[in-house]
Amino acid sequence: MAPPSPSYSDDLIRSVLSRVKSIAVVGASANTVRPSYFVAKYLKDKGYQVFPVNPGLAGQTIAGMEVFGSLSDIPTPVDMVEIFRNSEAAGPITDEAIAIGAKVVWMQLGVINQEAADRAEAAGLTVIMDRCPKMEFGRMNGEMGWVGANSQVIDNRRKPLGDPRANLSRVAIGQGKGGL
Protein backbone atom coordinates (compact mmCIF):
# COMPACT_ATOMS: atom_id res chain seq x y z
CA MET A 1 0.00 0.00 0.00
CA ALA A 2 1.33 3.42 -0.99
CA PRO A 3 1.89 6.01 1.73
CA PRO A 4 -0.73 8.75 1.93
CA SER A 5 -0.11 11.84 -0.16
CA PRO A 6 1.10 14.78 1.94
CA SER A 7 -0.98 17.95 2.00
CA TYR A 8 0.50 21.34 1.08
CA SER A 9 -1.10 24.76 1.25
CA ASP A 10 -1.58 26.82 -1.89
CA ASP A 11 0.51 29.53 -0.20
CA LEU A 12 3.47 27.15 0.12
CA ILE A 13 3.18 25.93 -3.49
CA ARG A 14 2.81 29.51 -4.77
CA SER A 15 5.80 30.64 -2.67
CA VAL A 16 8.04 27.87 -4.01
CA LEU A 17 7.05 28.44 -7.63
CA SER A 18 7.56 32.20 -7.35
CA ARG A 19 10.92 32.18 -5.57
CA VAL A 20 12.80 29.49 -7.51
CA LYS A 21 14.53 30.55 -10.70
CA SER A 22 16.53 27.43 -11.62
CA ILE A 23 15.30 23.84 -11.62
CA ALA A 24 17.19 20.58 -12.13
CA VAL A 25 14.89 17.88 -13.52
CA VAL A 26 16.41 14.56 -12.45
CA GLY A 27 15.24 11.72 -14.67
CA ALA A 28 14.55 13.97 -17.67
CA SER A 29 13.82 12.07 -20.88
CA ALA A 30 14.52 12.95 -24.50
CA ASN A 31 11.33 11.10 -25.48
CA THR A 32 8.83 13.86 -26.27
CA VAL A 33 5.84 11.85 -25.00
CA ARG A 34 7.34 11.25 -21.54
CA PRO A 35 6.03 13.47 -18.74
CA SER A 36 9.57 14.43 -17.69
CA TYR A 37 10.21 15.84 -21.17
CA PHE A 38 7.15 18.04 -21.37
CA VAL A 39 7.39 19.17 -17.74
CA ALA A 40 11.00 20.31 -18.31
CA LYS A 41 10.00 22.07 -21.55
CA TYR A 42 6.94 23.68 -19.94
CA LEU A 43 8.99 25.02 -17.02
CA LYS A 44 11.59 26.37 -19.45
CA ASP A 45 8.82 28.03 -21.48
CA LYS A 46 7.50 29.64 -18.27
CA GLY A 47 10.86 31.34 -17.71
CA TYR A 48 12.68 29.00 -15.37
CA GLN A 49 16.29 28.03 -16.06
CA VAL A 50 16.00 24.25 -16.43
CA PHE A 51 18.81 21.70 -16.22
CA PRO A 52 17.84 18.19 -17.37
CA VAL A 53 19.77 15.51 -15.45
CA ASN A 54 20.14 12.02 -16.93
CA PRO A 55 23.46 10.14 -16.84
CA GLY A 56 22.60 8.21 -20.00
CA LEU A 57 22.06 11.42 -21.98
CA ALA A 58 24.81 13.62 -20.48
CA GLY A 59 26.22 16.04 -23.04
CA GLN A 60 23.19 15.80 -25.31
CA THR A 61 20.26 18.23 -25.39
CA ILE A 62 16.60 17.95 -24.46
CA ALA A 63 14.33 20.65 -25.91
CA GLY A 64 17.41 22.79 -26.47
CA MET A 65 18.70 22.35 -22.92
CA GLU A 66 22.08 20.75 -22.13
CA VAL A 67 21.75 17.48 -20.22
CA PHE A 68 23.96 16.84 -17.19
CA GLY A 69 25.01 13.47 -15.77
CA SER A 70 24.43 14.44 -12.12
CA LEU A 71 23.43 17.38 -9.99
CA SER A 72 27.07 18.05 -9.11
CA ASP A 73 27.88 18.45 -12.84
CA ILE A 74 25.65 21.53 -13.16
CA PRO A 75 28.01 24.54 -13.26
CA THR A 76 25.66 27.05 -11.59
CA PRO A 77 23.60 26.97 -8.39
CA VAL A 78 20.23 25.23 -8.58
CA ASP A 79 17.27 26.46 -6.54
CA MET A 80 15.04 23.40 -6.92
CA VAL A 81 15.62 19.73 -7.67
CA GLU A 82 12.64 17.99 -9.20
CA ILE A 83 12.76 14.21 -8.95
CA PHE A 84 11.30 12.12 -11.80
CA ARG A 85 12.54 8.84 -10.32
CA ASN A 86 10.94 6.27 -8.04
CA SER A 87 10.55 6.77 -4.29
CA GLU A 88 13.59 4.63 -3.44
CA ALA A 89 15.86 6.57 -5.83
CA ALA A 90 14.60 9.83 -4.33
CA GLY A 91 16.73 9.21 -1.21
CA PRO A 92 20.19 9.50 -2.79
CA ILE A 93 19.00 12.27 -5.12
CA THR A 94 17.75 14.24 -2.12
CA ASP A 95 21.13 13.78 -0.43
CA GLU A 96 22.83 15.14 -3.56
CA ALA A 97 20.39 18.08 -3.61
CA ILE A 98 21.39 18.88 -0.03
CA ALA A 99 25.09 18.60 -0.96
CA ILE A 100 24.81 21.08 -3.86
CA GLY A 101 22.93 23.64 -1.75
CA ALA A 102 19.50 23.41 -3.40
CA LYS A 103 16.70 25.19 -1.55
CA VAL A 104 13.81 22.92 -2.59
CA VAL A 105 13.35 19.22 -3.29
CA TRP A 106 10.20 18.49 -5.29
CA MET A 107 9.20 14.85 -5.80
CA GLN A 108 6.97 14.16 -8.80
CA LEU A 109 3.51 12.55 -8.67
CA GLY A 110 3.67 9.15 -7.00
CA VAL A 111 7.10 9.81 -5.46
CA ILE A 112 7.07 9.85 -1.65
CA ASN A 113 10.15 9.25 0.51
CA GLN A 114 9.54 10.53 4.04
CA GLU A 115 13.04 9.65 5.29
CA ALA A 116 14.62 11.69 2.49
CA ALA A 117 12.16 14.53 3.15
CA ASP A 118 13.09 14.53 6.83
CA ARG A 119 16.82 14.76 5.98
CA ALA A 120 16.20 17.61 3.54
CA GLU A 121 14.00 19.54 5.98
CA ALA A 122 16.61 19.06 8.74
CA ALA A 123 19.13 20.63 6.33
CA GLY A 124 16.80 23.62 5.80
CA LEU A 125 15.27 22.67 2.44
CA THR A 126 11.59 22.94 1.56
CA VAL A 127 10.17 19.59 0.44
CA ILE A 128 7.13 18.88 -1.68
CA MET A 129 6.20 15.28 -2.50
CA ASP A 130 3.67 13.63 -4.80
CA ARG A 131 2.96 16.79 -6.80
CA CYS A 132 3.76 18.04 -10.30
CA PRO A 133 5.16 21.58 -10.59
CA LYS A 134 3.72 21.91 -14.11
CA MET A 135 0.25 21.05 -12.88
CA GLU A 136 0.58 23.25 -9.81
CA PHE A 137 1.88 26.18 -11.87
CA GLY A 138 -1.04 25.77 -14.25
CA ARG A 139 -3.54 25.47 -11.40
CA MET A 140 -2.20 28.60 -9.70
CA ASN A 141 -2.40 30.55 -12.95
CA GLY A 142 -5.83 29.42 -14.15
CA GLU A 143 -4.50 27.20 -16.96
CA MET A 144 -6.11 24.00 -15.70
CA GLY A 145 -9.50 25.27 -16.84
CA TRP A 146 -8.21 25.07 -20.41
CA VAL A 147 -8.54 21.29 -20.20
CA GLY A 148 -11.77 21.23 -18.24
CA ALA A 149 -10.28 20.79 -14.76
CA ASN A 150 -11.48 22.86 -11.83
CA SER A 151 -8.40 24.77 -10.69
CA GLN A 152 -10.25 26.22 -7.68
CA VAL A 153 -8.77 29.58 -8.73
CA ILE A 154 -11.21 32.33 -9.61
CA ASP A 155 -10.19 34.28 -12.70
CA ASN A 156 -12.00 37.44 -13.74
CA ARG A 157 -9.91 38.10 -16.84
CA ARG A 158 -12.18 38.79 -19.77
CA LYS A 159 -11.80 36.36 -22.63
CA PRO A 160 -10.90 38.07 -25.92
CA LEU A 161 -13.69 38.39 -28.47
CA GLY A 162 -13.57 35.36 -30.74
CA ASP A 163 -11.85 33.22 -28.10
CA PRO A 164 -13.49 29.78 -28.33
CA ARG A 165 -13.35 29.52 -24.52
CA ALA A 166 -15.69 32.51 -24.23
CA ASN A 167 -18.62 30.37 -25.44
CA LEU A 168 -17.90 27.19 -23.53
CA SER A 169 -20.83 27.54 -21.14
CA ARG A 170 -23.37 27.73 -23.99
CA VAL A 171 -21.77 24.83 -25.84
CA ALA A 172 -21.60 22.76 -22.69
CA ILE A 173 -25.37 22.99 -22.19
CA GLY A 174 -26.18 22.27 -25.82
CA GLN A 175 -27.04 25.79 -26.97
CA GLY A 176 -23.96 26.55 -29.05
CA LYS A 177 -23.38 25.72 -32.71
CA GLY A 178 -24.04 22.07 -33.32
CA GLY A 179 -25.39 21.44 -29.82
CA LEU A 180 -24.51 18.31 -27.89
Image (spheres, rainbow, N blue to C red):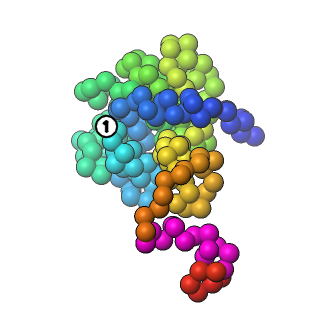
Q: Taking 17 as reference, is 32 above or below it?
A: below
Residue at coordinates 57% horizontally, 40% vertically from top-left?
131
In the depicted view, which residue is nearer to us: 83 or 137? 137
Judged from the image, the secondary structure of the residue bearing numbered disc 1 is strand
Tell me which corner region of the image, top left, top right, bottom left or bottom right, holds residue 80. top left
Residue at coordinates 39% horizontally, 58% vertically from top-left?
32
Which range is magenta? 162-174
Horizontal side of 121 relative to 75 (left or right) equals right
How crowded pointer 1 is (Cα within 10 Å; few <14, some 14-19, many 20+) is rated as some
- At label 1, the amino acid type is Gln
Please identify the quadrant where the N terminus is shown: top right
Residue at coordinates 34% horizontally, 38% vertically from top-left?
48
Q: Taking 99 as reference, is 168 above or below it?
A: below
Q: How many marks?
A: 1
Q: Position of residue 162 (x, y in %)?
A: 43, 72
Magenta region includes residue 131:
no
In the picture as drawn, the residue positioned furthest to the right comes out as 1
Magenta region includes residue 173:
yes
Q: Position of residue 96 (x, y in %)?
A: 42, 23
